[in-house]
Image (cartoon, grey):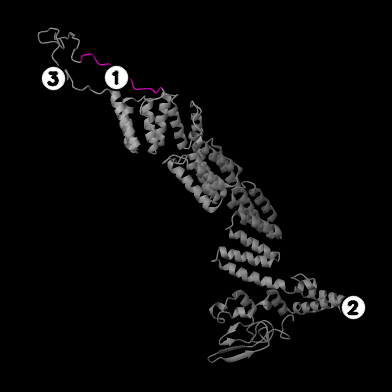
Amino acid sequence: MDVDPQPVNGAASPPPPPKPAANPSAQKNFAVPIPNGSVPNGNVNGNDEAPAPPPHKSNPSSPVPSPIEDAESYKTAGNRFFKEKNYAKAIEQYSKAVDLFPNSATYLSNRAAAYMSNGQYEAALDDCSRAAELDPNNAKVLLRLARIYTGLGRPDEAMAIFSRIVPPPSAKDMAPTREMLHHIKSAKDTLQRGSAMSMVLHALDQAERLLGPGVSKPRKWQLMRGEAYLKMGRENSLGEAQGIAMSLLRNNNQDPEALVLRGRVLYGQGENDKAIQYFRMACSCDPDFRDAVKWLRIVQKLDRMKEEGNAEFKAGRWQAAIQKYSDALDIDPSNKSMNAKLLQNRAQCKIKLHQYEEAIADSDRAVSLDPSYTKARKTKANALGKTGKWEECVREWKAIQELDPSDNSVRQEIRRAELEMKKSLRKDYYKIMGLEKNADANDIKRAYRKMAVKLHPDKNPGDAEAEAKFKDMQEAYETLSDPQKRARYDNGDDLIDPADMFSSGGMGGGMGGIDPEILFSMMGNQGGFGGGGFRSGGFPGGAGGFPGGAGGFPGGASFNFGGAGAGSRQRGGFPGAGAGFPYS
């Protein structure tokens, strides 16, 4: 950047100094009457001769500098400091020249250049705008003014100034302004489309690179950035939007747009009551601000619809609750956090109505909006279990455990789902006999008689398929007709691996990882553990045994219980062939 050493292009020059007299010592004598009759400049005798001037005034060896000479010397000194990049000193010298001639476009333009280089763009704008008013056709002043507007993040105004310059400025001079305009337009267009918010942030970053040194980000640009962060909807991005809102409010706590931005952040974080307060404050600052009114109504309506849905849910009116939650979902599709909660609530209603697939779909949508929303994942896991998709159910519970390892209830759900998965892979005795799981003893007998007549080998000689079905039916009936065997079958006791019960060094240290609830359900009311060993019938299935009959452990192996004074007890015949196992 350069400064003007002399007025250029017809710039307004300082006024010329007054023309000095031909002989400074020769003065025209004159007399002015005064009341006492004395004559100024006359001698004591009253003649017209002027008194002799003092010796230091009579023939000066050097003339006194004129104001224009002083101003030019200040400008010259300012130029020197400018070239040395001592911009503060340059401003000081140019200011002295401006003080002498405030309407000099040259001095104002030079000081504007120094202000720019010193990062004081607002002061530069004031000086250069005045210079352009004083000398509206000065191309150099106008070019400087356009650069100042660009440095301040006002490219539209810069382009308007460029259009006044004759001859037109070069493409190189206009390139930064055009680039800034391109990035800002790209950010606005992408923001309006509502997608690819990261591209909005990138465009704003590129535009901000073209700001002058020390220039604050324009308020409108900050609001655009805050809007982009809001539309991202993630926890971190909401925090970024909050920081922008608070920064703007520190500069002006009555800024309605900043108040609305702060309110929308709170709304996105689920703090609806606080959000409403900020929207009302914005309305107070500017009653005609439509954005504040719009968001106030949105949050109030959404709160009302959600509460109505919750009331229907508590009253057990599931379909009515679904309708309320669905209506609430249409109010503001952009609020990911709130909509995730509404979808999870609707999924709960659909589970109550046995609409499990729809509940899973709603849960998936909720998780897609908020991946950290474990409550929606739990709802999905429960719905998967209801549909019998136990393998997927186990995977979902394990994913939840990774998100929240401290939740002890999740470990229990994993064990329960794994057990149900094992149960689903074995023969389904109820399905074999065409029974519901709540069938009573009479239902079981009737189903058995009906199937026995139909599948008996005597009626189906040589039919291998009928023979296999008959054997499955007998196996199913043997289990379901015996209350104890049926209970163990329903509970999955026959599927528990005893190795799980004694892993990690036996029963000490928390039973080796077995779920206590499952263990005690196995024990039932048959005596449990006794002092110094097992009581008779300590576990279901026989004296001193484990599930599977009197023998105890599956597989026919034996197990020794020993200890000081306890002797040893050995039980063989684990569940296996003929040892009480439900099927071979």
Q: Decide if residue 511 is in sight here.
A: yes
Left or right of 97, for residue 400:
right
Highlighted range, magenta: 10-23
- The kind of residue tagged 1 is Pro
Separation of residues labelled 3 and 2 (CA atoms): 155 Å
Residue 140 belongs to magenta span: no
Location of mark 2 (residue) = 459
Q: Is residue 193 above or below residue 447?
A: above
**Which of the two marks, 3 or 2, is nearer to us in this view?**
3
Element type at mark 2: loop
Residue 19 belongs to magenta span: yes
Say which label, 3 or 1, has the lower sequence index: 1
Element type at mark 1: loop
Separation of residues labelled 1 and 2 (CA atoms): 136 Å
Location of mark 1 (residue) = 17
Say which label, 3 or 2, has the lower sequence index: 3
> Of the numbered discs in the image, which one, if any, rests on residue 55?
3
Say which label, 1 or 2, has the lower sequence index: 1
- The kind of residue tagged 2 is Lys
Q: Nearer the viewer, residue 321 or 575?
A: 575
